[in-house]
Amino acid sequence: MQLAELVQDLIPYRVQISAHHSSAEQPDDGHLRGIEISSIELDSRQVKPGSLFVCIPGFQVDGHQFVSQAIERGAVAILAQKPLDVPVPVIIVPDTRRALAYVANRFYGFPTQKLRLIGVTGTNGKTTVTYLIEKMLEDQGRKTGRIGTINMKIGERLVEVKNTTPESLHLQQAFHDMLQAKCSHAVIEVSSHALDMGRVRGCNFGVAIFTNLTQDHLDYHQSMEEYKRAKGLLFSQLGNGISERDLKYAILNADDPASSYYAKITPAQVLTYGIKSEQADIKAADITLSPRGVSFTVHYGTEQEQFNVPLVGMFNVYNVLAAVGAGVVEGLSLRQISDSLSEVQGIPGRMEVVEAGQDFTVIVDYAHTPDSLANVLSTARQLARKRLICVVGCGGDRDRGKRPLMAQMAVKYADLTVLTSDNPRSEDPAAIIRDMEKGLIEQDVSQTKYTSIIDRRQAIHWAINKAEKDDVIIIAGKGHETYQEIKGQRFHFDDREVAREALASLKL
Ligand SMILES: CC(=O)N[C@H]1[C@@H](OP(=O)(O)OP(=O)(O)OC[C@H]2O[C@@H](n3ccc(=O)[nH]c3=O)[C@H](O)[C@@H]2O)O[C@H](CO)[C@@H](O)[C@@H]1O[C@H](C)C(=O)N[C@@H](C)C(=O)N[C@H](CCC(=O)O)C(=O)O
Ligand SMILES: Nc1ncnc2c1ncn2[C@@H]1O[C@H](COP(=O)(O)OP(=O)(O)OP(=O)(O)O)[C@@H](O)[C@H]1O
Ligand SMILES: N[C@H](CCC[C@H](N)C(=O)O)C(=O)O
Ligand SMILES: [Mg+2]
């Protein structure tokens, strides 16, 4: 695409034609004509001949530092926030991350104008809900792309991801590729970081779903109010136009107090779901929980339908209801949704059972917030005929406030807790465990109820060696992850593999 065409949505911008040349005052297409852009890159290491390099002042480094490298690698133009001493045209804008969303949308042909886009936000349950929606839409023959924490699915292709919600450039590229792969729908997790940083700017969401709001990410958002506000951006951005071809829906959890705020700020149609709230539009009743899954009746208007879903825990009833909301606004019947979800496969790293013929249960789960840990452990408590053992750590360079709370949740429900490392990242693993322990010391928890083992492999081995017949072990926090990040370096680490290795070393 021609550079002049690519930058036409950026208002205002200035053009620096070459180093030491004064800037044109207004967008001057003449200077940009004839420059063909073959790709957009925000990482200099990815630049190819013909790229437009976008300089982003980041949280770690300033992308403007890497222009020379980008030009050496073949960048033919730069999008920046200041004049630069370089031999190629520089487009200057006040905010490059914002501008990136505009150029990425245009470069990839505004793909979300042609895709039905469903976004899921909330502290917990996003990944689960996206998998449920993907399953029921695909069962009705609607080809569905998916983006989130585990990976992204573009047609049949699975692609690795760095973020739960990628940067606007990679998002728009993924949507473009989904259209090429003949997808009609895309279902994506929308993290609060992504909303705050504008990674989803320009995405034409048709449906926005809220799961719940509990404590996480206060390192980034500073307060629960700010965190709630960030998630609200998904609902306030749903678009104010009412069009018969493109109706917008906000699907909200009536049992979560944050929903009334989201209902207020969204211009879209609101549909609520819940278990406790009388007012919910979609309601679950007669709930039965078992080790095999959840069973309940869904009521919606005058319809009702029995659901038997092989996912365990009350929290999964909420996840199913959120997915039902998306299903009904997309025109599916409760029967079709129920049929699909009755055969849903387990989601990687979510209550994933590791089975090697042992006489106790080992479950790997991604709970990494106080609320999700409480939910998972209370569910496991009901499954355990004997003791409940919990192996848990907290990530480094993340919300420190959740550390003591997660430790408190662990000892509240588990008979025995092993505090260990998660991804320490740049922090001292022992210091993270000390932060967790503070929550226990504060509550005078008996030292017989917990122990600390810094090395996660040793912690898992220790728990499995301690387990007796009919106990349940929950290994929490890393779920599907296949790495452990220590001092900025990633090592291969998979809780499920390590659990299998520990089980194999037992004399069964
Ligand atoms: C704090 C944060 O969110 N950082 C995100 C941010 O990175 P950044 O802009 O700070 O990057 P930076 O390293 O300072 O680099 C600045 C610029 O220089 C460029 N650069 C850098 C080095 C180089 O050699 N050449 C070069 O061009 C970089 O490509 C970048 O454009 O923008 C990047 C692109 O979008 C993100 O990948 C990155 O996410 C990091 C990896 C991260 O860990 N983010 C977490 C906190 C996050 O976003 N999590 C949520 C999920 C949370 C949840 O709900 O559980 C998510 O959506 O993933
Ligand atoms: N609706 C829910 N309410 C509370 N906890 C939940 C809910 N759904 C799942 N969980 C718990 O939270 C963990 C994470 O679930 P899931 O991966 O679906 O959430 P997520 O919102 O995508 O998380 P992330 O922010 O890390 O992407 C699960 O392993 C489970 O322990
Ligand atoms: N998306 C979350 C994942 C946390 C998973 C946990 N294993 C950790 O590393 O803290 C985050 O980046 O905060
Ligand atoms: Mg997720």
Image (tube, rainbow, N blue to C red):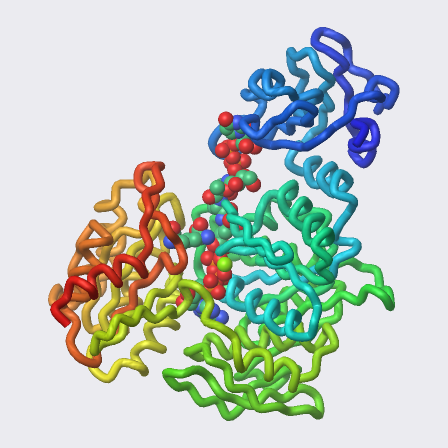
Q: In this view, does 90 lie to the left or right of 411?
A: right
Residue at x 40%, y 58% (from the top left corner): 480
Residue 226 in view, yes or no: no
Q: Decide which of 356, 81 is in the foreground and name it.
A: 356
- Please state the horizontal and vertical placement of residue 92, each as a whole percent of the image: 72, 24
Q: Quadrant of the N terminus?
A: top right
Residue 446: x and y, percent?
Answer: 14, 67
Give the left or right position of residue 4, taking residue 419 as reference: right
* Whole-percent x, y for residue 150 in the image: 49, 56
| Nearest the eye: 455 or 211 | 455
On screen, 49 above or below 370? above
Q: Is residue 68 above or below residue 460?
A: above
Name the residue at 87% across, 68% down: 244
Placement of 441 over or under 199, stated as above or below: below
Q: Nearer the viewer, residue 68 or 431?
A: 68
Q: In which quarter of the image is residue 240?
A: bottom right
Q: In which quarter of the image is residue 55?
A: top right
